[in-house]
Image: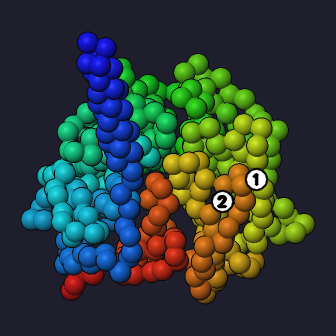
């Protein structure tokens, strides 16, 4: 009996250990992010010029979202860079004006219009299921999706006379809330607070940081001035100010009581300071293009370098003879660049390959 009892205990222990081992293995596999092993394996996507609308961005480290035009209908297409397979996620009979992918990679915002007097906004899952839909009267709208809360979308709706109305769409209540703002362009700081860079008469002097609580209308002026760019993501923020003495942009990345600072030569584009949009990554680090010398980028060739920035430091990845817009995947394994985002960039190692082939 004692022998049988000991044997049973050892057997159950072994089974339990095997079960735990299988669970850990499954968890590890589920948490493993699938990435492109080499851009040489990427399958080029061929499309006719009249069918290409826009390359929107990354849905994963290997999947892209593309807007295509087909026989008076427009489609959202998911394309896998490794397999070359594509899947239609959403089809619209109305013109698609713009599409946003939420940083969570779980939802997609689609703005459509069937007339010049209003805009329709639909939010879907990455599988194509419709979650929200609302309409705003406007000639043109500016959309800012809260990066931490998919239920909150900010809108500035412009009229013919350049006046505008500011709204927050709260998906949790399916409600459009109007609030007052003396600037139609802002960024999310938290679920309640918006950051506004309030400019004076001369935009080259930079602006003053102002906060708006859209729920109660409270406006607060901050002490930070000479600001030319602001951005927030999760618990991190980035503020770029102008150093007129050294003709430099001064970047400050902050998270809690930690910060990382760096500078770059200041450049203009059509008589305004030009700070390329940063690409936030999941871990709250970022990718950004930095000019390598002062000047006016609208006057011809101007070198830029691609850098990765975290609280641990600033690291150069590669450089380009001229500015090209970029969008990066959430983990930062790949970026796209070019007028149509036709070039894919591998970060480690730094390599480029044309993945989009547009035929006449």
Examine the image and state in which quarter residue 235 appears. Answer: top right
Q: Residue at x 78, y 64 (%)?
A: 263
Q: Residue furthest right?
A: 245
Determine whether the residue tagged by mark 1 lies in a helix, strand or loop.
Answer: strand
Camera-side residue: 23 or 327?
23
Question: Is any part of residue 79 visible from this angle?
Answer: yes
Camera-side residue: 38 or 166?
38
Residue 79, position as x, y percentages in the image: 24, 63
Q: Which mark is residue 260?
A: 1
- Quarter of the picture holding the N terminus: top left
Q: Residue at x 71, y 72 (%)?
A: 267
Disc 1 packing (10 Å; few <14; some 14–19; many ≥20): some
Q: Are marks 1 and 2 in contact (CB under 8 Å)?
A: yes
Residue 137, position as x, y percentages in the image: 34, 38
Position above or below: 173 against 299: above
Q: Residue furthest left?
A: 71
Locate residue 337 relative to residue 65 in the image: left or right. Answer: right
Of marks 1 and 2, which one's residue comes earlier in the chain? 1
Camera-side residue: 7 or 206?
7
Position above or below: 121 against 239: above
Examine the image and state in which quarter residue 51 appears. Answer: bottom left
Question: Is any part of residue 12 visible from this angle?
Answer: no
Q: Residue at x 40, y 26 (%)?
A: 170
Position above or below: 196 against 86: above
Residue identifier under label 2:
309
């Amino acid at each position: 009996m004692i022998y049988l009892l000991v044997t049973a205990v050892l057997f159950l222990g072994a089974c339990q250990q095997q079960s735990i081992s299988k669970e850990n293995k499954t968890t590890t596999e589920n948490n493993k992010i699938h990435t492109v092993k080499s851009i040489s394996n990427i399958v080029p996507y061929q499309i006719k010029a009249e069918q290409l609308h826009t390359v929107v961005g990354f849905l994963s480290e290997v999947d892209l979202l593309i807007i295509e035009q087909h026989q008076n209908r427009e489609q959202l297409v998911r394309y896998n860079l490794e397999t070359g397979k594509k899947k239609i996620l959403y089809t619209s009979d109305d013109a698609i004006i713009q599409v946003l992918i939420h940083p969570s990679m779980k939802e997609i915002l689609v703005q459509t219009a069937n007339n010049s007097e209003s805009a329709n906004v639909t939010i879907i899952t990455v599988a194509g299921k419709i979650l929200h839909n609302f309409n705003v009267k406007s000639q043109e709208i500016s959309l800012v999706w809260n990066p931490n809360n998919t239920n909150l979308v900010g809108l500035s709706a412009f009229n013919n006379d350049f006046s505008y109305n500011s709204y927050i769409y709260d998906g949790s209540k399916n409600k459009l809330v109007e609030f007052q703002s003396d600037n139609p362009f802002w960024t999310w700081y938290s679920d309640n607070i918006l950051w506004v860079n309030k400019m004076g008469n001369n935009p080259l002097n930079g602006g003053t940081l102002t906060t708006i609580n859209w729920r109660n209308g409270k406006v607060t002026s901050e002490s930070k001035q000479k600001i030319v760019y602001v951005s927030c993501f999760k618990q991190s923020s980035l503020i770029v100010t102008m150093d007129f003495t050294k003709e430099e942009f001064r970047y400050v990345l902050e998270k809690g009581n930690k910060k990382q600072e760096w500078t770059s030569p200041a450049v203009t584009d059509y008589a305004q300071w030009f700070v390329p949009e940063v690409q936030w990554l999941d871990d709250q680090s970022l990718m950004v293009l930095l000019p390598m010398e002062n000047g006016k980028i609208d006057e011809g060739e101007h070198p830029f370098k691609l850098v990765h920035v975290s609280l641990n430091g600033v690291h150069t990845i590669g450089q380009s003879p001229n500015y090209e817009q970029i969008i990066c995947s959430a983990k930062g394994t790949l970026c796209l660049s070019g007028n149509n985002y036709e070039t894919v960039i591998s970060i480690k190692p730094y390599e480029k390959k044309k993945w989009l082939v547009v035929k006449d």
